[in-house]
Image (spheres, helix red, strand yellow):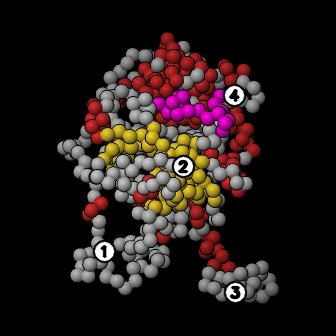
Amino acid sequence: MHTDEGAPVINNDDTMTAGRRGPSVLQDTWLQEKLANFSREVIPERRMHAKGSGAFGTFTVTNDVTKYTKAKVFSEVGKQTEMFARFSEVAAERGGADAERDIRGFALKFYTEEGNWDMVGNNTPVFFLRDPKHFIDLNRAIKRDPKTNMRSSNTNWDFWTSLPESLHQVTITMSDRGIPSSYRFMHGFSSHTYSLINANNERVWVKFFFRSQQGIQNLTDQEAAQVIAEDRESHQRDLFDAIEFGQYPKWTLYFQIMTEEEAKQVDFNPFDLTKVWPKEDFPFVEVGEMELNKNPENYFQDVEEASFNPAALVPGIGVSPDRMLQARLFSYPDAQRYRIGANYHQIPVNYPRGVKDFHPYSRDGQGRMDGNGGGQIHVEPNSYGNWKDHKDMAEPPMDAGDVDYYDFRGDDNDYYTQPGILFNRMTAEQQLVLFENTARAMGDATLQIKHRHINNCYQADPKYGEGVAEALGIDIKDVDLTPTPRDSDQANREANARGAENLNVPTEPAQPASVNDLPEEGRDTNVQEPTSLTGIMDDPFVL
C-alpha cells in the first residue's frame, strides 16, 4: 500500500497519538490523506440520467450506406469500430431503483478514426418537449418538491398536461414499455433528427434507430414493485451478468432517411422532437450491428466519468434545425466541464482513441495530463503551418430564415394525431394497461389536472379519454371535452386555466377496479421471446 505520492504506508491500523491514550497528532499525514480523499471521492451527479450502467463493444457495418454519408465509420461493409454504451434512467438519482417507470437513456460513443461520434438518445422515439426553454422546468417537475423533498405527482402531471405536445411521450411512458425488464430488452432511438452528408456534399435528414435483437420485454407496475423490493440494481445486474457469461446483447442500427425536398413537403415539422416520421413513408435502411461484449474494469472510471455530447460529430454526420438538439449541443459539454473538469476528454473512456494523430487545440486547465501540446507554438495563424483547419470538410449551407422568437404553436398545433395513431395500434390489453398505469401514476393530482389530461387523451381518440376517465373513477360526462385552439402560447395558457375556479382541489389516488383481477405476479402484456421478434412494421411503438 502506498500514499498518493508513492511512499509506503507505514501503519494503516493505528492513528499516531501523543501517548497511548492521548489525542491524535497532525503529523499523521496518512490519516489526513485518507480523510481528505474521502471528502472528494464523489463528483457532482448528472442532473438527468444520474443512474446508469455501461459496457464496451463493437459496431460492424452490414450494409453499404455510402450514398448517404461519407462518415468513415460506415465506409465499407464489414468495418468494425470500438464503442462504449451507457444506459440510464432519466429522472432517478444515483440511488434510484432500476425498475422504475421512466424513459431510459441510450447513449453511445463510437471511437472512429475521425474522432468520437456520440449518439445520445433514449429508448423512445420522441420526447416531452420540442422547445428547450422548458427543459429545466421538466427536470424540476419530475424530480423532488422543494418543500417536501418528495416527488410530486401533482407538479409532474400539471407540467405534462399543460404542454399538449407531451402527450405522445406520456402515452409511451404510461404504456407497458414504460418499464423495460432490463436494458437488453429495449430499443434505442436518436429521437432527434440529424443530417448525413455524402462524398458529393449532398445532405439528407436522418433518424437513427437501434432495434434490440433480444426482443422487447417489459414489467407491469406489479412486477416492477416485486423486482424493486428484491433488487434495486436489476437492470445493471442483468446487463453485467449477461456479458460476463458470454450472452452478448446486440442491436441492429437502421437509418430513416428524408431528403431536404421531402422535408419541405411533409405536413408536419420533421425537426419536432415530439413527432416521429411514419415508417410507411420513410422506411428503415439497415446499416450495421452493435454488440456489447466487455464489462467495465472500474465503474467509476468507465461509467460514472463517461461523458456524452451531441456535438461530438464526425465528417458525414451533422445536426439539424431541431430546437432541442441545438440546445443540447451546448448544454451537454458544458455539464461535463462542470461535472468532471475542463479536460474530461482525457479520461480514458472519453479519449478519441480511434484518431491516430490527435492534436487538440485546448491548453492547460485543471487535470491536464496529455503533454499539453509540449513546447510547440500554440497560436493560429502562425508562420509555421501548424494548427491547420479542414475547410474541405465543411457541410453544405443550411437554409434559414429571419431571426425572431417564433411561436412554434403557430407553426404546428397538431398535438394529437400521432398519439391517437399509437393508441389505436395497441392491443385492447395494452390499452387497458395504459389506462391503469396512467391512473396510478396521477396519484393525488388535482381534479383540474386529471380533467385536463382526460381532455388531451380524448382529443387523440375518444376511447383513450374514456378509458383514462374510467380508470381514474371520473364520470367523463363531468369533463369539459370542448376542443380548445392551442395555436399560440397565450391560447395554450388559457386552455390550461380552464376549470381553475372549481376543480383546483386535490383528489384521492385512484385504484383501477381491474387491478383486482390481476394475478399476484401482475399482467405480462408485451413479451417477445428472442426467437419471435416483433418486426419493425408490426411494432405499434415504431409508428
Q: Which mark is residue 387?
A: 1
Residue 440 percent location from the top left of the image: 61, 29
Residue identified by numbered label 2? 289
Q: Is residue 512 above or below residue 137?
A: above
Residue visible at 70% across and 37% down in the picture: 225
**N-terminal label among 1 and 2:** 2
User: Which label was assigned to residue 8?
Assistant: 3
How dense is the environment of label 3, judged by Cα within 10 Å: few (below 14), some, or many (20 and up)?
A: few
Q: CA distance from mark 1 to mark 4?
A: 61 Å
Q: Earlier in the sequence, mark 1 or mark 4?
A: 1
- Where residue 100 appears, as percent x and y from the top left, is 62, 41
Q: Is residue 363 above or below residue 443?
A: below
Please, what secondary structure does the residue beneath circle 1 have? loop
- In front: label 3 or label 1: 1
> Residue 361's spot in the image, x, y percent?
35, 72
Residue 313 visible from this viewpoint: no
